[in-house]
Image: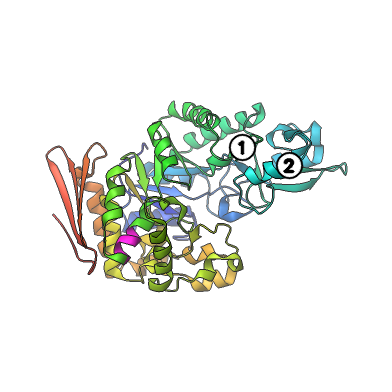
Amino acid sequence: MNLKNEIMLITYADSMGNNLKELHELLNQHYQNAVGGVHILPFFPSSADRGFAPMCYDKVDEKFGDFSDVEALGKEYYLMFDFMVNHISASSVYFKDFLEKKDASAYKDMFIRYSQFWKNGEPTQEQTDLIYKRKPRAPYVDVTFSDGSRDKVWCTFCEEQIDLDIRTEVTKKFIRDTLLSMCHHGASVIRLDAFAYAVKKPDTNCFFIEPDIWELLHEIEDVVKKEHVEILPEIHEHYTIPMKISDQGFWVYDFALPVLTLHALYNHDGQYLKHWLEMCPMKQFTTLDTHDGIGIVDVKDLLPDEEIEKVKEQMYSQGANVKKIYSSEAYHNLDIYQVNTTYYSALGNNDKAYLLARAIQFFAPGIPQVYYVGMLAGSNDIALMEQTKNGRDINRHYYSKEEVAKEQERPVVQELKKLMTLRNTHPAFSLEGTIQVNSANDLLTITRTFGNDSITLHANLTIYDYTIE
């Protein structure tokens, strides 16, 4: 099914019900007109990071079902799949074969060996300092081959996520084959996870390297375009980078909206939000929440630095069970630029504030994505997080089929569903249309217009009342 201008649910295969079949049943039962598409977070066999360390892409993790379940879902909802263009699992057959056979392995060129990449087999301190990295040292893992020899292999994220060498023929073939397989199994959109890290060059920051990154994106686009599939590059960075990607005609994410909306609701002032809504592109997917924390880096220069600090502190002071420690090393937090919380809890579990935040999102340019915890107005799951000691699990509650049905009785969930259905069905939300925003003190007005149709949100950012006409 082709991409539609309708709300996309983001969920794991086992977060609403135990598997893909149960997810499909629940959507048909409760969300028939409210959800048009589904981003199924990585559902392939994986060795770490809740699916983001895939071992292969040619099968579905059997806990979730199989490709017939994915394809059945894809007949009724347009689908987004994740492709980790930057890395693959250390437990994959490719990497294991490389460790076993070293230079005799058919996959030896899929990976980046320090001994071959750097001039003297090691980066200098200057070269290491340049790299945009997630670790305090150069990004590598020490490996021992079966013959006893050793080398360092490039590894940006956790040790189960080994970076791919995208310059080589064997990797290019792997990328092409994977993309085509995803197209044939029902993907309408392929999300390129961590793609900005994929190009590596000595004496650069190895992050979003131009022009090479454009060559990679266009190569990928050429493969999927023939199959009528879109790509969505995923990047958390200064807003000017997604704008650049948008200028090249690609879909992008609006990761600035979550914090700008919180700022407007906490401080009863829509001026910064207005500025962004008027400049962001129409060809984008909007978010308030995802499977990760709420990103702070994305609003740099869209909010003054002191306002960014203020909104972070407000998350801790006004949020329900939002604590600094949950976004720290104590809870294995990889990324200091994110705050771990559900969006509902960031707003103090306040139904009115939360519904207004969603109304703002649905009136923003682009196609809204709603994370499953957000769709059920879920509060922070402290118990799960304490059990795993992983800060991000605060926002990754597992809902049984019975729990999902029970949540439908809450007024906030019912109201949200009505808003979602309105967003999916009203013609003024066309991506060909226009947006007009007015902000005066604590009053915010957003009008979407297409042809003879228009729809307006009138919101009070102090008492969280809103009307739609």
Could you say where residue 404 lies in the image, as x and y percent from the top left?
39, 65
Judge by depth and name the residue closer to the eye, 239 or 24.
239
| Precedes in sequence: disc 2 or disc 1 | 2
Residue situated furthest right in the rendering: 148
Query: SS of the residue at dot 1?
Result: loop
Could you say where residue 102 lies in the image, as x and y percent from the top left?
80, 36
Question: Does 299 sit left or right of 277 as displayed?
Answer: right
Q: Residue at x 36, y 36 (%)?
A: 2
Quarter holding the N terminus? top left
Camera sees residue 444: no
Residue indicated by mark 2: 124
Judge by depth and name the residue closer to the eye, 374 or 346.
346
Could you say where residue 101 lies in the image, as x and y percent from the top left?
81, 37
Camera sees residue 181: yes
Marks 2 and 1, how far apart in space? 12 Å
Q: Residue at x 36, y 64 (%)?
A: 376
Relative to 389, residue 270 above or below: above
Prevailing secondary structure of the magenta residues: helix
Judge by depth and name the residue closer to the eye, 399 or 318.
318
Question: Does 158 sit left or right of 430 as displayed?
Answer: right
What residue range appears in magenta? Answer: 261-266
Residue indicated by mark 1: 204
How crowded pointer 2 is (Cα within 10 Å; few <14, some 14-19, many 20+) is rated as some
Relative to 51, residue 86 above or below: above
